[in-house]
Amino acid sequence: MKRYIFILFLAFTSFITAQSLQLEKIMKGDSFIGNQPDNQYWSIDGKTIYFDWNPNNEIGNSKYYWNTSLSKPEIVPENEFDFSSIDATSQKEFNTIYYTKNGNLYSYDKKTKQLKKVLVATERIYSVERSANPNIIFYQQNRNLYQLNTSDFSLLQITNFKSGSETPKEKETEDYLTQQQTELFQFIRDTKAKNDWYDKKNENKKSDLPKAIYYGKSSLEQIKPAPNGKFVTFRLSDYAPTTTTNVENYVTNDGYTKNESARAKVSINNLSKHKMCIYNVKKDTVYYVSFSNLSGIKKYPAYYQEYPELKEKEEEEKSRWNS
């Protein structure tokens, strides 16, 4: 009997609480239920965990840390902020950690616990990746991949991506007056012969830079080196032009409504095209991966047979492939 009374009491209490819960409180979100920790990661030595948190309902999150010596989380001191910003999740097996900060390359030694500037440049450095060789790291700069050997600090540019298309070399055509001057003056003939000789010799000189890889108007994405540095994969994407929708903003600083752009209209015409590519560093050659010959790539799902319109679509496309 007592158990039933207790259950009824809990149900009644929950009902009263639900009735007192107002929409205004619900719409407060995290400030009502409590802000949750976010962006958690471990320190390099694995003894401290860092995370973003806002327990006091401030305007934004602050960086906190906790370890077994603390009774509760505390805000990261300013003198340790650089150390706490290092995310070494993918470099656990290495003694020296490489990372980017403010677009520059830094290193952190686990044994000596010292931070060091490795490379500072005007062009932002990003996407640091480790090689199978602990002394070699890869990083990206200005949409190209670079290889840095930290033992002798030799630096190599691995790729040479360029937007647009290669400009064909125009063949010079001589007009009548130029031809006449060449025929009349030995000096002009000698100068032309000398220039042609130097041009021919320079053609045989191979540049140390890799050949330019032009990607036209496509978007260059997901550049990733192989751990041994022999290959580089990347993706070229063509996105269809989209038509944005407009919404009226009624809450403004000056009291006048403003027309603002919102998300693009959803349509099957907005589908993008992607191309996977592999760059062979040694051969200085790009291969384009084709998935059209994979087994089952053109096989339609079985449920298409249950819908007449999808069944007809399958038959139409199959006939198009076979034609």
Image (cartoon, rainbow, N blue to C red):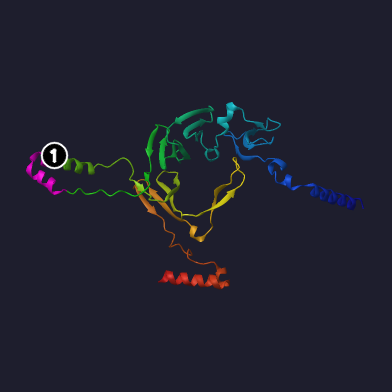
Asked if 142 appears above or below 5 in the picture, the reply is: above
Tell me if 165 is positioned left or right of 249 in this view.
left
| Count of picture labels | 1
Q: Is residue 8 magenta?
A: no
Viewer-proximal residue among 274 and 227: 274
Q: Residues within 10 Å of mark 1 (few under 14, many from 20)?
A: few
Image x and y of residue 44, in percent: 57, 34
Q: Position of residue 309 (x, y in %)?
A: 54, 71
- Quickly name the residue at label 1: 191
Q: Is residue 50 above or below residue 293?
A: above
- Residue at image coords 15%, 48%: 175
Q: Which residues are magenta?
A: 174-189
Residue type indicated by callout 1: Thr
Q: Which image quadrant: the C terminus?
A: bottom left
Residue at 50 percent of width and 70 percent of height:
314
Identify whether 58 is placed above or below 204. Answer: above
Q: Residue at x 51, y 36 (%)?
A: 94
Q: Main secondary structure of the magenta part?
A: helix
Measured as percent of width and height from the top left, residue 166 is found at 32, 49
Secondary element at tag 1: helix
Q: Is residue 176 magenta?
A: yes
Image quadrant assignment for residue 322: bottom left
Q: Nearer the viewer, residue 246 or 97?
A: 246
The quarter of the displayed image where residue 121 is located: top left
Rendered location of residue 91, percent (x, y):
52, 38
Q: Can you name the residue that lies furthest to the right here?
A: 1
